[in-house]
Amino acid sequence: GLVKDLVTLSKLQEESKTPEKSTFNLSQAVTETVSSFEILAKANGITLNYDVGKNIMMTANENEIRQLISILSDNAVKYTTENGCIDLRLYKSGKTLTLSMTNDCENISKEKLEKLFDRFYRADGSRSRETGGYGIGLSIAQVIVERNGGKIEAVSTKPNTVTFKITF
């Protein structure tokens, strides 16, 4: 798994700074991708809510954007606290598309939030065996967002939550 993730990250970084783009229905891509995590979330006692604006179109690399949504969804399911909640929103304001995913989690300090996109970084190293993964998914997510002309940030607006906010 680690080798596969490193190869993915390396390929994304080596390829042209502008990937092949097409116009696609982002609303549909988000709904289809996130819905595949519903069973896993429910099995872990997690409530998964999503509020997706209708027929929001985007010009980007659809496969990469679906991979981004999958990474964020997987991360949220892995790190949401027991009986917690994940809230996903997709909306358009003017020319700006915003995708945000908020989940309940153990409190994350501002210093740790800034490091979440670093390769191999894990905010809680003691849980690495329990949750799986290698701390590289968010690095891949960041590269995907940047390659497709967006910006990603991790913020915590209230205790015991984290929000990944992506704007295009």
Image (tube, helix red, strand yellow):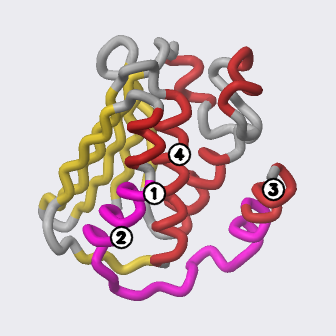
Q: CA distance from mark 4 to mark 2?
A: 16 Å
Q: Amino acid at mark 3?
A: Leu
Q: CA distance from mark 4 to mark 1?
A: 9 Å
Task: Specify the quadrant of the image occupied by residue 8.
Answer: bottom right
Q: CA distance from mark 3 to mark 1?
A: 18 Å
Does the magenta portion include 78? no
Q: Residue 6 has which mark? A: 3
Residue 139 against residue 82 in the figure, above or below: below
Classify 10 Å Cα crowding around label 3: few (below 14), some (14-19), many (20 and above).
some
Q: Which residues are magenta?
A: 9-36
Residue 111 against residue 1 in the figure, above or below: above
**Left or right of 110 on screen, residue 89:** left
Q: CA distance from mark 3 to mark 4?
A: 17 Å
Give the mark nearer the N terminus: 3 vs 2: 3
Q: Which residue is mark 2?
A: 29
Q: Classify mark 2: helix, strand or loop.
A: helix
Q: Classify mark 4: helix, strand or loop.
A: helix
Q: Name the foreground residue: 25 vs 47.
A: 47
Residue 61 coordinates in the image, percent (x, y): 49, 78
Q: Which residue is mark 1?
A: 69
Q: Amino acid at mark 4?
A: Asp
Residue at 23% x, 61% y: name it.
96
Q: What number of labels is visible?
A: 4
Classify 10 Å Cα crowding around label 2: few (below 14), some (14-19), many (20 and above).
some
Give the mark nearer the N terminus: 3 vs 1: 3
Q: CA distance from mark 3 to mark 2?
A: 25 Å
Give the mark nearer the N terminus: 1 vs 2: 2
Residue lying furthest right in this view?
3
